[in-house]
Image: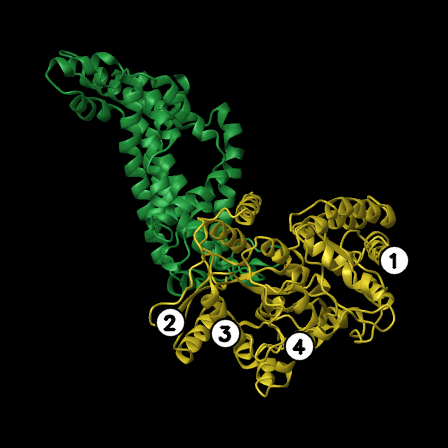
Chain colours: A green, B yellow
């Protein structure tokens, strides 16, 4: 605003003075812009921490361009001597990696869509609709998150086998359709959502579902983005259940596929690293795209 | 964490399976109205050896019209196959044949869902006497023959010829002794150039720490456990003498690279920082790819016995009804026959599981394809005894492995460390297992 005021034409003023004011305003803007980007004290702590976080990714990327012999060299090789792309070629051409990638996308995408719809509906119901046993139901629902996942694997396997889902992508999607964490995240958000906005909608003649769809959900985007990112990353990285439920190579997810590069005695590191780089890209993209809303939702949740 | 979780699942599943916790239906007979039997075969092979296995299966299917073998890795590699198999066992959906580590044989047998071929193995077609002794013992925990031997390996000393030449040390003679081994390792050690004489793993998989202790124990007349498997005997004078040798090498000569994760010795060797690498045939592809100038020799002896240790794995047959069991036996008789085994060896670099394979004409081509593997195959005759196959075995080796590691790190003396490990082992061995 200061800058805009400075450039307003001043009747009767000397043109040179006017130009000087413009120049001064621009200088101020530049200075304040620079100041915004100058390191502050907090960055002294964050910088080494960010290096620690980034280093494994950089190492993974560099290693993915090395041969197994180069990877195993002691002292360790930091920069690849030659840009070896054999790891990528083998992963993409000699394995079912494209299938694995597509399967992971289908499973993660379906899980995200389902959780956005079902968890937001359930969270909204718990936050807004009064019904007998609501609190007990919510507590019981949250308590399911305390049961170790490993304990439920065998009964889940038996049920899924009986309904014919084992060794299909359905076996990977169905358990992720909803989650206690997702419902609680949305429930917390809707509890702090201003009721007045909904009431205004109701006065205008909207049904409860219309209020939810047209007023509440558009304003819940930060929470939905956070839920989407958390669900995607969890579904994408899940190894344990797919390892148990899937047997045929065409139905592997990327994480299960990567384990096949580790034989009983020999580990194909260049292929593992190339595969891991390709596997990490979607997760990074999802996070980078939704980062701002994710941080908004998390910080909002912390502030309560 | 993943391994712990998988091990937990495996234990739960085995318990569920042993309690009859499956879906409860009677095992399907497995044959279709046309008389064709379809088998599920989980071989746990990863690329590229999975393709070799598939070719063999295709060949079997073409020559056996009444049996269809559907092969797959099982969805994972060998190490992670156990929890999958045990979960499937609990659900009543076990494959017909699966590749299972020898160290899990007793646990898997305890599920009650495996076959017992003890009464059949001497019938024609099995050629049971043509398997190496260690293989036959591992596939028969408690005398119950749960399948067929699938793989055998052994420990020998792989050495870097260039490092020997640079140190002016002659190549080891096949008739060498442990004293010569110690002296050789000491001469080859060069702290200035970060070169170690030999390796010993002290972390990661403690089975790896323990199993290389056994050759020296057996050679000195010692035993791991009592004949009834109720008492640990590895803390005998033979065990103490064996561990004392390694202790002296590690703490006095400083000639031993104590591998904290059991995975660093290989890159040290391929990088020219380890002169002698106590390892096995699984290293051959890596060593040749890294273009190391290497050779190998059998383990040293106290006097003349160069006994080594072997870690065989098994093809386990699960009881999915008489028709499928019989078809599985037919398939495994065919798969483990010398000619098929040789095809498998050519594709995978595995060692022969039958001594008769060494006499096949094609064996010479195998030796040419895998330079250096010949002495390892010859060394199989030195694998005279097998490690115990008990449900408690994985925990017994953990106790022993921790004892060995503490001695090599200079934190304990051999006798008290082995006594403590033996005490822990005795406690484990006397816990009822429900078998």
Residue A133 sits above or below residue B186 on the image: above
The reply to whether label 4 and label 2 mark residues of one chain is yes
Circles 4, 3 touching at the beta carbon (< 8 Å): no
Residue B330 is tagged as 3
Give the mark, 3 or 2, whose residue is nearer the N terminus: 2
Using a 10 Å C-alpha cutoff, classify the residue at mark 1 as few (fewer than 14 neighbours), some (14 to 19) or many (20 or more): some
> Closer to the observer: label 3 or label 1?
3
Residue B218 is tagged as none
- Is residue A184 or residue A81 the one in the foreground? A184
Q: Please give left or right for residue B306 compared with residue B378 in the image.
A: right
The CA span between labels 3 and 1 is 47 Å
Chain of the residue on which disc 4 is drawn: B
Residue B36 is tagged as 2
Give the mark, 1 or 2, whose residue is nearer the N terminus: 2
Chain of the residue on which disc 2 is drawn: B
The residue under label 4 is: B129
Question: Total number of numbered labels?
Answer: 4
> Closer to the observer: label 1 or label 2?
2
Using a 10 Å C-alpha cutoff, classify the residue at mark 3 as few (fewer than 14 neighbours), some (14 to 19) or many (20 or more): some
The residue under label 1 is: B241
The CA span between labels 1 and 2 is 59 Å
């Amino acid at each position: 605003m200061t800058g805009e005021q400075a450039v307003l034409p001043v009747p009767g003023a000397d043109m040179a003075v006017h130009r000087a004011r413009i120049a001064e305003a621009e200088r101020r803007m530049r200075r304040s812009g620079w100041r915004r980007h100058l390191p502050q004290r907090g960055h002294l702590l964050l910088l080494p921490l960010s290096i620690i976080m980034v280093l494994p990714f950089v190492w993974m990327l560099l290693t993915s361009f090395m041969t197994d012999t180069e990877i195993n060299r002691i002292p360790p090789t930091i920069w690849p001597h030659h840009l070896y792309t054999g790891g990528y070629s083998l992963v993409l051409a000699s394995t079912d990696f494209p299938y694995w990638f597509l399967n992971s996308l289908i499973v993660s995408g379906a899980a995200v869509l389902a959780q956005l719809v079902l968890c937001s509906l359930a969270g909204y119901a718990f936050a807004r609709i009064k019904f007998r046993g609501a609190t007990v139901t919510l507590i019981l629902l949250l308590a399911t998150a305390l049961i170790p996942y490993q304990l439920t694997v065998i009964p889940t396997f038996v049920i899924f086998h009986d309904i014919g889902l084992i060794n299909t992508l359905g076996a990977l999607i169905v358990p992720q359709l909803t989650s206690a964490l997702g419902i609680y995240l949305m429930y917390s958000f809707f509890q702090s959502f201003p009721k007045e906005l909904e009431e205004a909608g109701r006065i205008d003649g909207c049904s409860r579902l219309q209020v939810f769809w047209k007023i509440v959900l558009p304003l819940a985007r930060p929470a939905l983005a956070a839920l989407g990112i958390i669900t995607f990353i969890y579904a994408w990285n899940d190894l344990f259940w797919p390892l148990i439920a899937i047997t045929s190579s065409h139905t592997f997810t990327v994480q299960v596929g990567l384990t096949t590069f580790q034989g009983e005695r020999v580990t194909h590191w260049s292929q593992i690293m190339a595969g891991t780089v390709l596997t990490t890209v979607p997760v990074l993209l999802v996070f980078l795209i939704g980062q701002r809303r994710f941080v908004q939702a998390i910080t909002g949740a912390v502030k309560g | 964490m993943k391994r712990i979780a998988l091990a937990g699942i495996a234990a739960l599943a085995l318990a569920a399976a042993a309690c009859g916790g499956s879906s409860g239906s009677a095992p399907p007979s497995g044959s279709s109205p046309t008389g064709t039997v379809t088998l599920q075969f989980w071989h746990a092979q990863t690329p590229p050896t999975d393709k070799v296995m598939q070719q063999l299966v295709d060949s079997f299917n073409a020559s056996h019209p009444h049996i269809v073998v559907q092969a797959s890795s099982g969805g994972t590699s060998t190490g992670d196959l156990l929890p999958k198999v045990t979960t499937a066992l609990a659900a009543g959906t076990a494959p017909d044949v699966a590749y299972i580590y020898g160290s899990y044989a007793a646990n898997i047998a305890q599920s009650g869902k495996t076959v017992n071929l003890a009464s059949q193995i001497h019938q024609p077609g099995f050629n049971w006497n043509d398997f190496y002794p260690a293989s036959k013992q591992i596939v028969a925990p408690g005398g119950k023959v749960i399948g067929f031997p699938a793989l055998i390996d052994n420990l020998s000393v792989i050495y870097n010829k260039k490092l020997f030449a640079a140190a002016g040390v002659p190549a080891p003679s096949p008739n060498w002794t442990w004293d010569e081994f110690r002296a050789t390792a000491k001469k080859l050690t060069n702290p200035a150039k970060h070169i170690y004489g030999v390796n010993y793993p002290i972390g990661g998989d403690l089975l790896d720490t323990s199993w290389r202790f056994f050759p020296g124990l057996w050679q000195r007349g010692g035993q791991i456990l009592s004949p009834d498997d109720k008492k640990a005997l590895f803390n005998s004078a033979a065990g103490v003498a064996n561990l004392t040798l390694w202790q002296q090498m590690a703490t006095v000569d400083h000639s031993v690279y104590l591998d904290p994760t059991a995975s660093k010795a290989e890159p040290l060797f391929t990088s020219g920082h380890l002169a002698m690498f106590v390892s096995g045939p699984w290293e051959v592809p890596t060593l040749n790819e890294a273009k190391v100038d290497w050779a190998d020799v059998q383990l040293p002896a106290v006097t003349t016995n160069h006994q080594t240790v072997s870690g065989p794995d098994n093809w386990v047959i699960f009881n999915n009804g008489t028709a499928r069991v019989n078809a599985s036996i037919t398939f495994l008789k065919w798969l483990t026959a010398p000619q098929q085994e040789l095809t498998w060896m050519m594709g995978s670099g595995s060692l022969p599981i039958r001594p008769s394979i060494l006499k096949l004409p094609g064996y010479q081509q195998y030796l040419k394809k895998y330079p250096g593997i010949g002495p390892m195959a010859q060394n199989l005759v030195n694998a005279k005894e097998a490690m115990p196959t008990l449900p408690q075995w994985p925990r017994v080796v953990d106790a022993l492995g921790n004892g060995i590691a503490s001695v090599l790190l200079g934190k304990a003396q051999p006798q008290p460390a082995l006594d403590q490990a033996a005490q822990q082992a005795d406690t484990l061995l006397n816990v009822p297992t429900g078998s």
